[in-house]
Structure formats: C-alpha cells, structure tokens
Image (cartoon, helix red, strand yellow):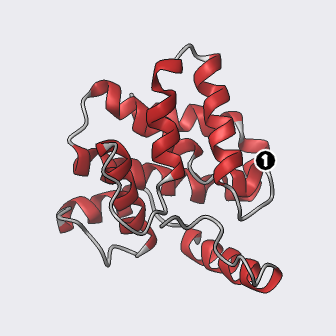
Amino acid sequence: MSLSTIHTILTSHQSKLGDGFDMYHNHCCRVYTYAVVLSNANEDEQQQLAIASAFHDIGIWTHGTFDYLGPSVSLAMQYLADNKLLHWNTSVYEIIMNHHKLSRYNSNHLAEAFRKADLVDLSLNLFTFGISQDQLKEANAQYPALGFHWFIAKQILRNIVTHPLNPLPIVRW
C-alpha cells in the first residue's frame, strides 16, 4: 500500500518532475524500502515514511532549487492537510528536514531510519547499516537508478559553482 502512496503522490507532480519522474520515483521507492527495513515500521509508520519519501527531494523539481528542504516540506504539509493527516505533521517534517543530517537524529526513530536509508541509496550501497545484500540487490533490481546519482552529482557541482558560500544548503549538522 505504501509504495502505491509514493506513486500516487509523484504522479500528481509528474508535470513538474518531467523527465526526472522515473529516476526520482525509483529513488523514493529504494529509500522507502530501506527505511522500512531499518525502522521495523508498523503500518502507520510505513505510511509516514511513504509520504516523506515522495516529498523529501521533490523541491529540486517543483521549485527549481538545490536548497529544496523548505519547499519539499511545504508540499508535504499541504498534502497532509489535504488528506486529513495533520497528526503526522511533526513526524513527516522531521523526516524530511533531517534526511541529510550528518549526525544521528535521536528525536524520531523514523527520521533516523530515513536518514540512514537515504545515505544507503546516495552512497550506492557503500553504507548499508545492516541491510542485507539480498535486500539491496532486490531493491536496486526492482527500482533501478536510471541516472539518479549522476543527476544529483551534477546538481551538487552546479550549486557549488553558483553558490560557493553555501554549496550544500541541504546538509544539517
């Protein structure tokens, strides 16, 4: 059910995602899959992770910026309000805002699992945090990268050149 939530949310933003739809969709599904494994999430928590997954980087496309955490959170909060899920505001906010935190996030186990899951995917599985090789291979086979990592590398390089005083605005300490 939660993977379908990701698909439904991203489909509603397909015009903004454009050619990036499939690669971002697959990134979201891989991160979601890893976060569920790392958090041992129950059904409600899986839904929160799915919503956060769909929105966590979406501001890159919807707002055309690499400083995308704020726009991504705003879209997620609007989604929660529209779907009468305001009781998840704090959790989804913390997941998205802390998914690039460099140190452990102790206030929300879902946010910490998601932080690790995103790092697993961005590192091309260099970091695994205990996720089995079989689980990694299965997720990567089911949801191939389709150039996502190269896209992110280009975004980082572009932002370093255009904003040298704030090259990685998404990173949190």
The vertical placement of 118 against 162, above or below, is above
Along the line of sight, the residue nearer the viewer: 153 or 4? 153
How many residues crowd mark 1 within 10 Å: few (<14), some (14–19), many (20+)?
A: some
In the image: residue 101, left or right of residue 73 = left
Residue at left offset 73%, top offset 51%: 17
Along the line of sight, the residue nearer the viewer: 164 or 56? 164
Asked whether residue 3 appears in the rendered view, the answer is: no
**Residue 118: percent from the left, percent from the top?**
42, 61
Residue at left offset 56%, top offset 49%: 56
Query: Which quadrant is home to the N terminus?
Result: top left
In the image: residue 64, left or right of residue 98 = right
Residue at left offset 60%, top offset 34%: 9
| Callout 1 amino acid | Lys
Q: Secondary structure at mark 1?
A: helix
In the image: residue 168, left or right of residue 120 = right
The vertical placement of 143 against 71, above or below, is below
**Residue 50: percent from the left, percent from the top?**
44, 38
Asked whether residue 134 appears in the rendered view, the answer is: yes
**Residue 138: percent from the left, percent from the top?**
28, 59
Q: Residue 83 sits in which quadrant?
A: top right
Task: Kindly identify which residue carries mark 1.
Answer: 16
Label tally: 1
Along the line of sight, the residue nearer the viewer: 149 or 96? 96
In the image: residue 12, left or right of residue 52 = right
Residue at left offset 74%, top offset 54%: 61
**Residue 163: percent from the left, percent from the top?**
79, 78
